[in-house]
Structures are given as structure tokens and as C-alpha cells.
Image (cartoon, rainbow, N blue to C red):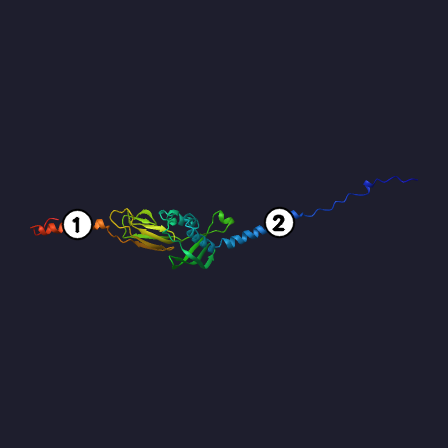
Amino acid sequence: MTEPAVDPRTVFVEYRPRRLPGKGVVVGVAVVLVLVGAVAMFRTSAAAPESAVRDFFGALANRDAAAALSASAPEVRDQPVRELLSDEVLAADSYHPPDRVEVTEARVEGTVAVVAVEYRIDRQEYTATLQLRRDDGLVNAIRQRWLVLDGIGKLTLTDVPEEITVNGLPIAAYDAQGPRILPALPGSYQVGVPEDNPLWNPIAVTAQVEPQVTTEVSVPLEARPAVRAEIERQVTELLDSCAMSPELEPPG
């Protein structure tokens, strides 16, 4: 008896091995891990409080007032008196930014930090201890950002005319309360009498501004030669008229 033919399709079953995760998945996971590590390193190193202080002084070296204020806390940068907090003042040749900046110590306690720094202004050595706080804004979720709290100093004006110039910029020296106090970024400024002042010679003095420090500025007032000559003429005329008067106490 002849056996029926067997169809090979019913005997041999197609073998399909189970697929393992491809190289693309492995590479993707590795990339994610590398990015997470890079972000963690970036947050803890590049965004350290020392870096924020260096950025602040670096902006001054670049004469970039906006960048220096951006490195400061909002409550510090939003000063009501802003005449000296401008690129125009820092761009003047008479402005000398701090140089040879060196961070000597940094301490972090939670969301606040203290950074000690040494620097020079006009070849004079200075030190400062700056307070910083960690930014709690959206940027901090990606980049841990520190903000300088007390990097700004002040100029207080004493014994100056009604109007002065600071690095060539005309500024009113008095307000309703008396001599003004002007917030200023660290560095060296030229404060003087305007060239067109009709009474006083255009004398200027140098003032160094330090963080957290109020610097008093007094400009010597020296009358112009023509003004001095006119005053002397009027005084002499008055004395001569008094000497020629027959009265014991002439009027005036």
C-alpha cells in the first residue's frame, strides 16, 4: 500500500528567533545617561557661586553694565537712581574697571553663599566679601544660578556745584533732600565740574567705588580767572567808596 505524500509545509515550521533590543535603543539610553550626567556636572561646577562672581567682574571688565546687573538679584538691579548704572558711563575712557580679580574663598549654606574676592582698582588692592543667593526662577531648573546681592557701591556728593559730570555725563548733584547719593558699579570714576560752568574751573577728581561701600566725593571749587577778577574789582570799588564816605557807618 502506497503511503500518501507528505506536504513539507505541514512538517517544517518557519523559525523566527525572538528579537532582542536593537543597538539604537542601547545607544539612546547611553546618550540619555550621558546628558543627565553632563547636566548634573554643569549645575554643580559651571554654575557655582564663584562663577557668578567671576561673571559679575567679567561684565565690568567688558564695560557691560547690563550684564553686571543681570548677574545681580532683581531687588539689587532695580535701583530707582540709575544714571551711573549704564553702558555709557562704563564705556568712557575715564572709567577703570576692577582687574586681577581672584576668588579666595567660597562657602555655601543651602540657598545662600558667601564669596571672598581680591581685586585691584587703579593699581590699588581691595578685598570684598560678597553675598549671593540661589535663583528660584525657571532658569534654575536647568542651570543652578547664583545672584550677587551686594556688588553695587555708592557715590555721595559733598561740596560740589549744582551740576557735575561723572565720566563726562552731566548729572544733577542735589535733590530736594540735599546732596545726592548715586548707586554705582565697582570701578574708578572721574567726578568734576562741567566744562561750560560759568563760575568754576572744570576740575575733576578720581573716585574709586567698592561693593557695599559709600564713597564721599568732594570737588574743589576754583573760580574762573574772569570771575575772580570781577569779584576783586567789585570788592575794591566797594572799599574805595566806603573810604571816601564822610559817614561813620555808610549804608550797605
Residue at the far left in the pictured view: 246
Residue ID for mark 1:
233
Q: Label 1 is placed on what type of residue? A: Arg
Q: Residues within 10 Å of mark 2 (few under 14, many from 20)?
A: few
Q: Position of residue 202 (x, y in %)?
A: 28, 50
The residue carrying mark 2 is: 29
In this rendered view, identify the residue nearer to me: 123 or 160. Answer: 123
Q: Quadrant of residue 122?
A: bottom left
Tell me residue 225's x, y (percent): 23, 50
Nearest to the observer: residue 110 or residue 115: 115
Residue 69 x %, y %: 42, 49
Indicate whether 68 appears above or below 9: below
Q: Is residue 174 visible?
A: no
Residue sitting at 59 percent across and 49 percent down? 32
Q: Earlier in the sequence, mark 2 or mark 1?
A: 2
Number of residues whose C-alpha sits closer than 10 Å to that of mark 1, classed few (under 14), some (14–19) or many (20 or more): few
Say what amino acid the circle numbered 2 marks: Val
Q: CA distance from mark 2 to mark 1?
A: 92 Å
Which residue appears at 11% of the width and 51% of the height?
242
